[in-house]
Amino acid sequence: MTKVLVVDDEKEVVELIKFLLEKDGYQVSVASSVFQAQGLLARSLPGLVILDRKLPDKDGLEFCRELRS
């Protein structure tokens, strides 16, 4: 089962994405901030990260660059 991490601070968006992915058999973790996402990533690496660009504690694009490096 492929793991997906959804990072977004809008509850309705997260619920919809999670519902759709779980319906297709993905294991979904969610975080509402970069800080929460970092904690989840320290425990387990997902196959895919879906990342909002505007997060409360850091720019999503900046965080994406950090993940890639």
Image: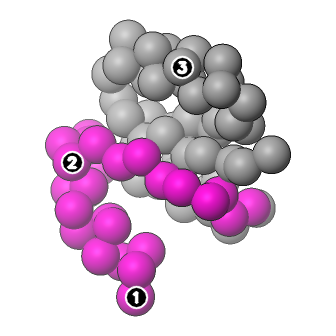
- Which of marks 1 and 3 precedes in the sequence? 3
Location of the C terminus (image quadrant): bottom left
Q: Are marks 2 and 3 in contact (CB under 8 Å)?
A: no
Report helix, strand or loop for mark 2.
loop
CA–CA distance between discs 1 and 2? 18 Å
CA–CA distance between discs 2 and 3? 20 Å
Q: Which residue is mark 2?
A: 53
Q: Residue furthest right?
A: 1
Q: Which residue is mark 3?
A: 20
13 relative position to 53: left or right: right
Q: Which residue is mark 1?
A: 69
Q: Please say whether residue 17 is one of the residues in the magenta stretch.
A: no
Q: Is residue 9 visible?
A: yes
Q: Position of residue 24 (x, y in %)?
A: 65, 26
Q: Position of residue 50 (x, y in %)?
A: 42, 46
- Which of marks 2 and 1 precedes in the sequence? 2
Report helix, strand or loop for mark 3.
helix
Q: Please say whether residue 64 is one of the residues in the magenta stretch.
A: yes
Image quadrant where residue 23 sits: top right
Start and end of the magenta stretch?
A: 44-69
63 relative position to 32: left or right: left
Point 32% across, 66% down: residue:
63
